[in-house]
Amino acid sequence: MKTPRISCGSPPPPLLLLLVLAGVCIDGYKPVIIVHGLFDGPKQFKTLSLFISKTHPGTEVTVIDLYDNLASLKPMWKQVHDFRKAIDSIMRKSPDGVHLLCFSQGGLICRAVLSTTPDHNVHTFISLSSPQAGQYGDTDYLKWVFPECVKRTVFRICYNRLGQKVSICDYWKDPHHISAYLQGNSFLTMLDGDRPHNDMKAWRSNFLRLKKLVLIGGPDDGVITPWQSSHFGFYDSNENIVEMRNQELYKNDTFGLKTLDARGAMAVCVHSGVKHVQWHSNFTVFRSCIERWLT
Ligand SMILES: *[C@@H]1O[C@H](CO)[C@@H](O)[C@H](O)[C@H]1NC(C)=O
Ligand SMILES: *[C@@H]1O[C@H](CO)[C@@H](O)[C@H](O)[C@H]1NC(C)=O
């Protein structure tokens, strides 16, 4: 009886081919686009850019130099318009797709860009300590912008046409004045579909072009309030936390969050001991929550 030859598959490829393949992998990191937050700019993202180029050599990293520092208070839709243009031109040069890494307020700018750009090729969207479900808290930032106000009174300034021209009002969500919010807010209400509009279906399918959504935040942030907003959790009218999966906008799947989650396309990363301005410069955070997604 003949013993059958056991095939171990195709013969090994020649060394040259292996080297070429390895080269393709190294060069294959998708470009990373960074969008800064309130009161900062490219300067604050040097460390993060260094982390990326050290761990993934050859990655093209762009920190978009728009609406830096005080200019970051400009209305959100205006910023979204200009950031979209800058992001778009990088996407066009990157047929294999790009990653978006967006910090704080920048995370909402990026979400709006994703929803309103029909043909985007963003692969992974990393939302780094961003008030995705809104902001309601007494913080230093609030004192700098509205020195006369505390969180209980800000709604009086924010929820009208003039107030909506200040970025933080565009995502200020007072849980005790939700009807004023729904009437007077023209940014977050539209993104969330709380204020129905004709483009909701289109925005949802744009958003769902994403392959991965990474939500990063933690309890010692000190600025994002409640900190769970970085993971789409928020206050109810008694200031108790309602987690993302119990939020109306999740259950109704108005902008695609639930679908994305059901697809397994969502990763959540929580770290304690990290203050707001440390998120982008903390190597532990980078290693455990960011690095693996930037391929
Ligand atoms: C969610 O769906 C419920 C029931 O259909 C509806 O009453 C509510 O207005 C919706 N909420 C949002 C935010 O779309
Ligand atoms: C960096 O992150 C680690 C892990 O969460 C945390 O324990 C540490 O306090 C952070 N350091 C700074 C300076 O943020």
Image (spheres, rainbow, N blue to C red):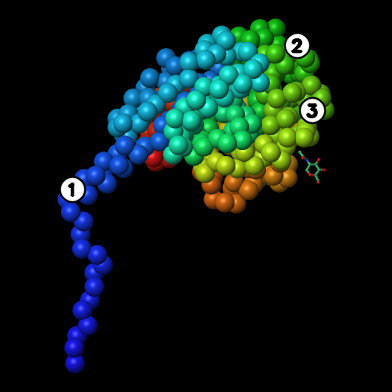
Q: What residue type is disc 3 on?
A: Leu
Q: Is 284 or 15 nearer to us in this picture? A: 15
Give how far across and how far down residue 156 sits, in percent: 78, 15
Label 2: few (<14), some (14–19) or many (≥20) C-alpha neighbours in 10 Å: few
Location of residue 212 with respect to 3 vertically, above or below: above
**In the image, which disc is placed on residue 16?**
1
* Residue position for label 3: 182
Question: How many angstroms separate mark 3 from mark 2 (CA)?
Answer: 16 Å
Q: Is mark 3 within 8 Å of ligand 1?
A: no
Q: Is residue 180 left or right of residue 165?
A: right
Residue 192 in sight here: yes
Circle 2 residue = 162
Instruction: Specify few, some or many for label 1: CA neighbours under 10 Å numbering under 14, 14-19, or 20 or more.
Output: few
**Residue at the extreme top:** 148
Q: Position of residue 123 (x, y in %)?
A: 49, 39
Taking the spot 37% from the left edge, 22% from the top edge, the residue there is: 47
**Which residue corresponds to the image point at 18% horizontal and 54% vertical from the top-left?**
14
Pick out the residue farthest to the bottom: 1
